[in-house]
Image: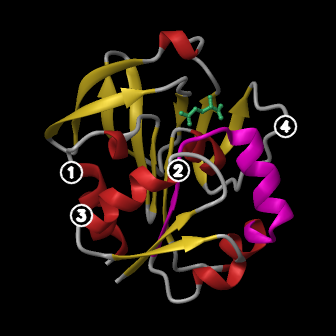
Amino acid sequence: MKIAILDIQGSVVEHLRALEACGVDVVRVKKPADLEGCAGLVIPGGESTTLSKLLSRFGLRDAILAHKDLGIWGTCAGAILLAKEIEDGEGVESLGLMDIKVKRNAYGRQLDSFEAEVVFAGKKVPAVFIRAPKISEVKRSCDILASSGDEVVAVREGKYLATTFHPEMTNDLTVVQYFISMCA
Ligand code: GLN
């Protein structure tokens, strides 16, 4: 199975290593043709304004939206790009694929980044939050897979997965394997 990683900005190498550790073929996506034959796409963390601009500039926005069978996992900035609604989202044009509302930079500044342990789909996993968004609304079509305190931090809607934390920055492959099984 081929899983793509959007390779235009952000934590690309970390995702690549985590996917390879799970034994899938990983494809770096810089242009629409790279998506061919891929069962899934990871949109990494990074800066959602930059990712949004580059998605349009490289023709990737339309290519992703046209690929109806593609499973997509967005981490942090990637989760922002999946949301239908964004608070403080000036400069971000999202793909609008998930029925969630997110608030950018909702935990504060870069210095307020933190690590926590969360229960993801019934299993404890380490979670790294880097200038993360909060998921402020989850519509009924979505399943909540993880929370941290009062905050929802992982949501699935059909073939789409959003995590506001960075599983690829830990050695725990639970979330990566979960996404791969979603795409299989
Ligand atoms: N603060 C970033 C944004 O709003 C997301 C940070 C991240 O992806 N780690 O795009």
Quadrant showing the N terminus? bottom left
Q: Which residues are magenta?
A: 40-60
Q: Which residue is mark 4?
A: 91
Residue 44: give its label: 2
Percent from the top left, x then y, of residue 19? 33, 64
- Of circles 1 and 3, the one toward us is 3
**Earlier-in-chain disc, 4 versus 3:** 3
Residue 21: give its label: 3
- Of circles 2 and 3, the one toward us is 3
Q: Which residue is mark 1?
A: 174
**Earlier-in-chain disc, 1 versus 4:** 4
Amino acid marked by disc 4: Gly
Residue 84 vertical placement versus 117 (above, below): below
Residue 106 vertical placement versus 57 (above, below): above
- Of circles 4 and 2, the one toward us is 2
| Ligand 1 has an atom within 8 Å of the beta carbon of the residue at disc 1 | no
Quadrant showing the C terminus? bottom left
Measured in 3D between alpha carbons, the distance from the residue under mark 1 to the one under mark 4, in whole angstroms, is 33 Å
Amino acid marked by disc 1: Thr
**Earlier-in-chain disc, 1 versus 3:** 3
Amino acid marked by disc 3: Ala
Element at badge 1? helix
| Ligand 1 has an atom within 8 Å of the beta carbon of the residue at disc 2 | yes
Measured in 3D between alpha carbons, the distance from the residue under mark 1 to the one under mark 3, in whole angstroms, is 12 Å
Q: Quadrant of ligand 1?
A: top right
Amino acid marked by disc 2: Pro
Measured in 3D between alpha carbons, the distance from the residue under mark 2 to the one under mark 3, in whole angstroms, is 17 Å
Measured in 3D between alpha carbons, the distance from the residue under mark 4 to the one under mark 3, in whole angstroms, is 35 Å
Residue 43: give its label: none
Measured in 3D between alpha carbons, the distance from the residue under mark 2 to the one under mark 1, in whole angstroms, is 17 Å
